[in-house]
Image (cartoon, helix red, strand yellow):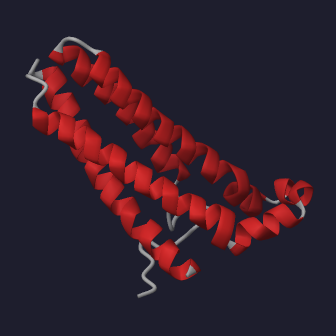
Amino acid sequence: MFEIFLSLHSILRWIMLLLLLLTLFRAYNGYAKKGVFSSSDRKAALFTMISFDIQLVLGLFLYFIFSPTVKLAFSDFGSAMRETNLRYWAVEHLAMMLLAWAMIHIGWVMIKKEKTDSAKHKKMLIFYLIAFLLLLVAIPWPISSHARPWLRLAF
């Protein structure tokens, strides 16, 4: 079960990143060109948020139920905080991803509250860009010290 959830989490990472890039492109383009905030812009932001929500649920299942690394970290939390890899998985990855998730949700609320199209594009650009930067830092890329494969497939 762990491998299935991990594979789904890995695959959804790419979907999230693609949706987020599309949303950022639409936000920047709309803001720069003073364009109308269209239903396509709203849908891009919404689908990005939904992908973050699904990813969060998968991640929380991994974190609280399946991950042997997190279980090891919680068996001696004090020692785990002194070990870089365990601290990353027990605290840092989760904290940064929750912040990214929060930025998407705050951005969504701010978009809905704005009255002008330009302000909607600007809010979408700001909050979704912050989420994107947090993701780039928090994802355990194969070139990072917490390296994971580009894609995990257990099926």
Q: Is residue 30 left or right of residue 98?
A: left
Question: Residue at left 50%, top 73%?
Answer: 5
Question: Residue at left 27%, top 50%?
Answer: 19
Report if residue 116 is visible in the image: yes
Q: Would you identify the image quadrant in which residue 23 lies? A: top left
Residue at the far top: name it. 115
Q: How many marks?
A: 0
Question: Residue at left 34%, top 53%?
Answer: 17
Question: Residue at left 14%, top 26%?
Answer: 30
Depth check: give the residue in front, 71 or 140. Answer: 71
Q: Quadrant of the N terminus?
A: bottom right
Report if residue 144 is visible in the image: no
Q: Is residue 57 above or below residue 10?
A: above
On the image, the x and y values in percent for residue 62 come to 60, 67
On the image, the x and y values in percent for residue 120 come to 24, 21
Q: Is residue 100 left or right of residue 31?
A: right
On the image, the x and y values in percent for residue 122 come to 27, 21
Q: Quadrant of the C terminus?
A: bottom left
Depth check: give the residue in front, 126 or 141. Answer: 126
Q: Is residue 96 above or below residue 35?
A: below
On the image, the x and y values in percent for residue 103 come to 45, 33
Q: Would you identify the image quadrant in which residue 45 lies? A: top left
Q: Would you identify the image quadrant in which residue 96 lies? A: top right
Residue at the far bottom: name it. 155
Q: Is residue 9 left or right of residue 16?
A: right
